[in-house]
Amino acid sequence: MATNPSIQEQLNPRLSYRKKLGSVVYFLLLAAVLVGIVSLIVLLARILFEGIPWLSWHFISDYPSRFPERAGLKSALFGTLWIMGLVAAFTIPIGVGAAVYLEEYSPKNWFSNIIEVNISNLAGVPSIVYGLLGLALFVQWMAIGRTVLAGALTLTLLVLPIIILASREAIRGVPDAYRQAGYALGADQWQVVRRIVLPSALPGILTGTILALSRAIGEAAPVIAISALVYLTFVPTDPLDRFTVLPIQIYTWVSRPQDEFRGLAAAGIIVLLVILLSMNAIAIYLRNKYQQRSRE
Amino acid sequence: MVQSQQESETLEPVAGQSQSDENVLAARNLSVWYGNFRAVRDINLDVKRNSVLALIGPSGCGKSTLLRCFNRMNDLVLNSRVEGQIIYNGTDLYAPSTDSTEVRARVGMVFQKPNPFPKTIFENVAFGLRVNGFKGNLQEAVERSLRQSALWEEVKDRLNSSALELSGGQQQRLCIARALAVEPEVILMDEPCSALDPVATLAIEDLIRQLVAKYTIIIVTHNMQQAARVSHETAFLMVGEDRAGYLVEMDATDKIFTNPSHEQTEAYITGRFS
């Protein structure tokens, strides 16, 4: 037996070394998280510190001005609201329609595979590419001009793939047992889609749509390509007016040499953030409501 | 009857098809293919009106596939193909002129797992009526179906709460009520109790015994005792060497369980076969 030591005698657990390694890894992982959170907090703190003194009612209700104390972002705010409304009106029917077709109707063959792969790729295309496409297609070729409509159509192209992907995800999440039950009761395909699939997928579709829209209103690059940097002292009243949006207004202010305009830019960022965060909050609320319902 | 209010558009009798009045459904040389795979082959059987037919047999013998031929649910499976005929009151359900949605309003179905829609209890039962353009009194029709499925007393005060709040057994009875609402002639049940506890199972079996006065029921079950308890006739299917299911024999349930004609049937029923 002495020539054959037991397994236990051959073990070398190195307990204290393993414990130390464990805690080092723990702190490295924590640091990785903190890099993101701390820089975000610092950024937010600076923006709030610089921007809050400039926030006031007249900042929202006045047009831009070359005098910082009189400058406001009314035209940009209304431009953003216009864009958001039009983009929603264009993307929701088209995006949901495309998603329903791909998930419920399209035959599964090489053609639908190509479409699928392409939609995923389109969702990753840089936004400036969409801006240049919009400039060539809508502004010049279709001669819509540098208008709200051209901007909205361009951003529609930008967010459409995202909305299609999100909607497909939501539609795919509807249990097949619901569809089977619908067909077994004598419903045809459209009745199953309209009465069962769409209502069940709606919260997921809305969540994805809102998140996609909030991406659209934060985009500056494609809108700069469409609308150029303009100094507007009016609110667009129809889709064929010229326009500006919040990210562009912020960009204009940041590029001014005077310090005061940087304060204005920070205040503009606060307004944009409030809009984005409230849209995300709505999305989260819808998601939670949906999850609760499906858990019951 | 709800049925009498709707005109049949396509379910016209096939010329030259004779069928005695006591059979509501019949399979004639029925084979089902999934792509190149034949799932069931050459099934011939008759289903008597107002009776319960149990389909039994080992896993993979094509019981569910056969069941889903009776309301053309196999149409929904990609690459599926049916050969032969299903005769429903003298009509071939697979004739080109037959509309599968109309078939499904006449031949209802209850699934293995309770699958109520994430809607209210009322809307679940009303669904089949709504999609089929019911013009009568919806409230009454829903109440009648819920009474028939012995669920009315339990849910009458909460018709507008979500069907997903019900227990599993209640959900399955709701699914039965949902199938009954359009007053089909036949109800297909695909292992309706396999997801339920023994008490809920007995409630469903009681229900089946009551419903047979008005409906014809075909039930797939893995539970021999259940087949013996609820059915009048039993069909025993086996898997052949080509992996296709075929009908070994079909007879009165009493006979199948006490004195079957085939050795295989006896082996399966007594548990000497797995």
Image (cartoon, rainbow, N blue to C red):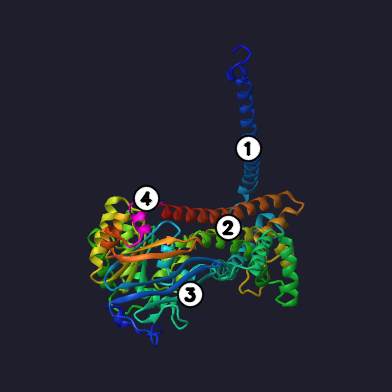
Task: Residue A207 in the image: state x and y as whole percent.
Answer: 53, 58
Q: Which residue is mark 1?
A: A34
Q: CA distance from mark 3 to mark 1?
A: 66 Å
Which chain contains the residue that carries disc 2? A
Q: Which residue is mark 3?
A: B83
Q: Residue B260: which quarter of the image? A: bottom left
> What SS does tag 4 mark?
loop
How many neighbours does mark 3 have within 10 angstroms: few (below 14), some (14-19), or many (20 or more)? some
Q: Which residue is mark 2?
A: A211
Which chain contains the residue that carries disc 1? A
Image point (72%, 67%), residue name: A227
Is residue A258 among what the camera can see?
yes
- Mark sitting on residue B272: 4
Q: Earlier in the sequence, mark 4 or mark 3?
A: 3
> What SS does tag 2 mark?
helix
Are labels 1 and 4 assigned to the same chain?
no
Circle 2/circle 1 CB separation < 8 Å: no
